[in-house]
Image (tube, grey):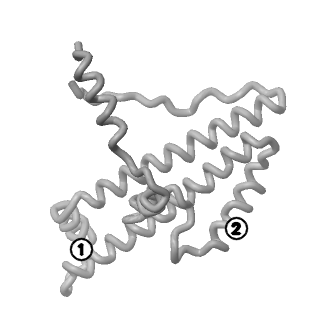
């Protein structure tokens, strides 16, 4: 059990961390823009705003939200779909760069991937981001379907996926 002095020290130390000024917060909000996959801003500089607007319009038309919470879920799906497209573009560019680095008269896609796996963990990170984003899309879509079914008086669908942790972390 922590002593009174340790508790006080921990509380004081907890007050020290984090960005406090408006200027600092303005800078720190761009920390995730290194790759842009997890940043809070949906549209990054250089991305086509009209494409994002069209994606949102198509999703709203297809998913037909009627309440604020349904609209919120559709917006979440749109944001995640946009991020997923960003991940896939990044993956494509990364593979293109790796292929150009090792393809000197060769045409071996597997060699390119092997080169990347040896070179860095970037591809593994991208696939983890992709999986996480897809999970977010499915989760929001399923919740939207449940809310819409309830609103119409139907029985909400049962969960499609169950998360199972089979890791043996100790």
**Lateral position of residue 55 relative to residue 170, left or right:** right
**Lateral position of residue 128 relative to residue 4, left or right:** right
* Image quadrant containing the N terminus: top left
Q: Is residue 138 above or below residue 103?
A: above
Instruction: Name the front one of labels 2 and 1.
Output: 2
**Lateral position of residue 144 relative to residue 7, left or right:** right
Please give the label number shown on residue 11.
none
Residue at 34% across, 35% down:
14
Q: Is residue 137 above or below residue 152?
A: below
Where is residue 61 shown, x and y percent of the image? 77, 56
Residue 87 shows up from this direction = no
Q: Secondary structure at mark 2?
A: helix
Q: Nearer the viewer, residue 19 or 122?
A: 19
Q: Is residue 66 above or below residue 147?
A: below
Residue at 29% across, 54% down:
124
- Work out whether mark 2 precedes mark 1 in sequence or the reverse, and give the earlier one: 2
Instruction: Report which residue position mark 1 lands on.
Output: 108
Where is residue 27 shown, x and y percent of the image? 43, 63
Q: Secondary structure at mark 1?
A: loop
Q: Is residue 26 above or below residue 100?
A: above
Q: Nearer the viewer, residue 11 or 116?
A: 11
- Measure how far apart labels 2 and 1 are at the Cα level: 37 Å
Quarter of the image where one finds residue 79:
bottom right
Where is residue 3 shown, x and y percent of the image? 22, 16
Residue 137 shows up from this direction = yes
Where is residue 154 shown, x and y percent of the image? 79, 27
Quarter of the image where one finds residue 33:
bottom left
Residue at 69% across, 39% down:
144
Please give the label number shown on residue 54.
2
Q: Residue furthest bottom?
A: 105
């Amino acid at each position: 059990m922590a002593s009174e002095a340790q508790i006080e020290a921990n509380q004081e130390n907890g007050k020290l961390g984090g960005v406090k000024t408006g200027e600092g917060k303005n800078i720190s909000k761009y920390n995730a823009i290194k790759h842009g996959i997890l940043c809070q801003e949906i549209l990054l500089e250089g991305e086509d705003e009209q494409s994002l607007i069209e994606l949102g319009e198509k999703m709203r038309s297809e998913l037909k939200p009627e309440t604020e919470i349904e609209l919120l879920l559709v917006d979440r799906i749109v944001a995640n779909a946009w991020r997923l497209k960003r991940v896939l573009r990044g993956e494509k560019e990364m593979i293109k760069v790796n292929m150009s680095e090792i393809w000197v008269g060769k045409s071996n896609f597997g060699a390119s991937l092997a080169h990347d796996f040896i070179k860095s963990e970037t591809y593994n990170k991208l696939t983890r981001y992709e999986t996480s984003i897809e999970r977010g899309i499915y989760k929001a879509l399923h919740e939207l379907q449940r809310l819409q079914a309830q609103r119409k008086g139907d029985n909400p669908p049962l969960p499609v996926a169950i998360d199972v942790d089979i890791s043996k972390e100790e």
